[in-house]
């Protein structure tokens, strides 16, 4: 099993749609979780951290399910500018280095 | 505030040549990371430093790759000799401490012909 697995997509959605991505991780000792966003030919940038109780930032909601070892990202009211690749990121064990999934591509169309 | 600065942005070289990539982390960050990104393998951690000391270089592909961090504000990743399969985008990132969120540089697009 890969350390961090994501559906590569692409997810094609119209503007205004709600879309959700899941990510599974293999190391039950992982402590920190993040979602990063990467635009084409750009560097990854932090979108949001993921907390055990779940957290929301505007149109974005992140949730963590430790029992099933998955993380989710929900985007409401999709905008054209949300088109990007979304990377799931997990610490290897404890507070160690970060392991990146390969990303899920989102394409939002008019 | 200046972010992580990498140079060059693009590098085209011939097989067998030496390539040196450079990185200036964010001031005050104690951890520095070198990643490589390809379509097939995604983002792979090559090596990371904590307080200028290499901690884990298990991701370095082979002896042709080496990295140094002579001080808190500068790091290099060197490939000698370079091979076509080294073609990728190389990112440098820094964080206040290991395990915290990463801040990436703009990357170096390396093409080895």
Image (tube, grey):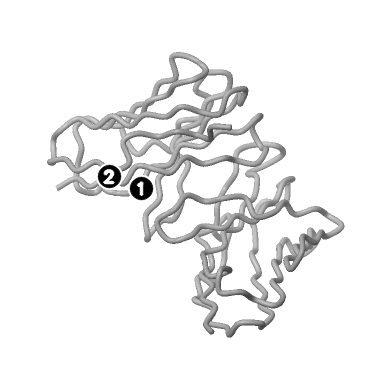
Q: Quadrant of the N terminus of chain B?
A: top right
Outermost residue toward the front in this view: B1
Which percent across, then down, holds residue B10? 28, 43
Q: Is residue A110 above or below residue A6?
A: below
Element carrying mark 2? strand
The local crowd at label 1, few if under 14, some if 14 to 19, many if 20 or more residues have their Cα within 10 Å, is many
> Which quadrant would residue B68 be assigned to in this image?
top left
Number of numbered discs overlaid on the protein picture: 2
Outermost residue toward the top in this view: B70
Is residue B53 rendered to the left or right of residue B39?
right
> Which quadrant would residue B94 be assigned to in this image?
top right
Which percent across, then down, holds residue B53? 52, 18
Is residue B56 rendered to the left or right of residue B82?
right
Q: Is residue A15 above or below residue B104?
A: below
Q: Residue at x 43, y 41 (%)?
A: B91
Q: Mark 1 or mark 2, which has the lower sequence index?
A: 1
Q: Residue at x 31, y 46 (%)?
A: B109
Q: Which numbered circle lies on residue B89?
A: 1
Q: Residue at x 56, y 68 (%)?
A: A81
Element carrying mark 1? strand
Chain ID at mark 2: B
The local crowd at label 2, few if under 14, some if 14 to 19, many if 20 or more residues have their Cα within 10 Å, is many
Chain ID at mark 1: B
Which percent across, then down, holds residue A47? 65, 55
Q: Is residue A43 above or below residue B22?
A: below
> Do pointers 1 and 2 mark residues of a single chain?
yes
Label 1 to label 2: alpha-carbon separation = 6 Å
Q: Is residue B62 above or below residue B39?
A: above
Instruction: Please state which of residues B83 and A18 is positioned toward the viewer in this rendering.
Output: A18
Which percent across, then down, holds residue A60? 73, 65
Q: Are marks 1 and 2 in contact (CB under 8 Å)?
A: yes
Q: Which numbered circle lies on residue B110?
A: 2
């Amino acid at each position: 099993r890969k350390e961090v697995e994501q559906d590569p997509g692409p997810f094609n959605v119209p503007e205004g749609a709600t879309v959700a991505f899941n990510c599974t991780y293999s190391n039950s000792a992982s402590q920190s979780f993040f979602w990063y966003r990467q635009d084409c030919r750009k560097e990854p940038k932090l979108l949001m951290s993921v907390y055990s109780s779940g957290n929301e930032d505007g149109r974005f909601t992140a949730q963590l399910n430790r029992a099933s070892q998955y993380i989710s990202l929900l985007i409401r009211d999709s905008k054209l500018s949300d088109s990007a690749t979304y990377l799931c990121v997990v610490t290897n064990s404890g507070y160690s280095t970060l392991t990146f999934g390969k990303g899920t591509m989102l394409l939002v169309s008019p | 505030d200046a972010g992580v600065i990498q140079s060059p942005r693009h590098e085209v070289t011939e097989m067998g040549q030496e390539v040196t990539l450079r990185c200036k982390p964010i001031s005050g960050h104690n951890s520095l990371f070198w990643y490589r990104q390809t379509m097939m393998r995604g983002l792979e951690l090559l090596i990371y430093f904590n307080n200028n000391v290499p901690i884990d270089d298990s991701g370095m592909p082979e002896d042709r790759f080496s990295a140094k961090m002579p001080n808190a504000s500068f790091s290099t990743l060197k490939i000698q000799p370079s091979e076509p399969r080294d073609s990728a985008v190389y990112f440098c990132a820094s964080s206040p401490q290991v395990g915290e969120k990463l801040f990436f540089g703009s990357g170096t697009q390396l093409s080895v012909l």
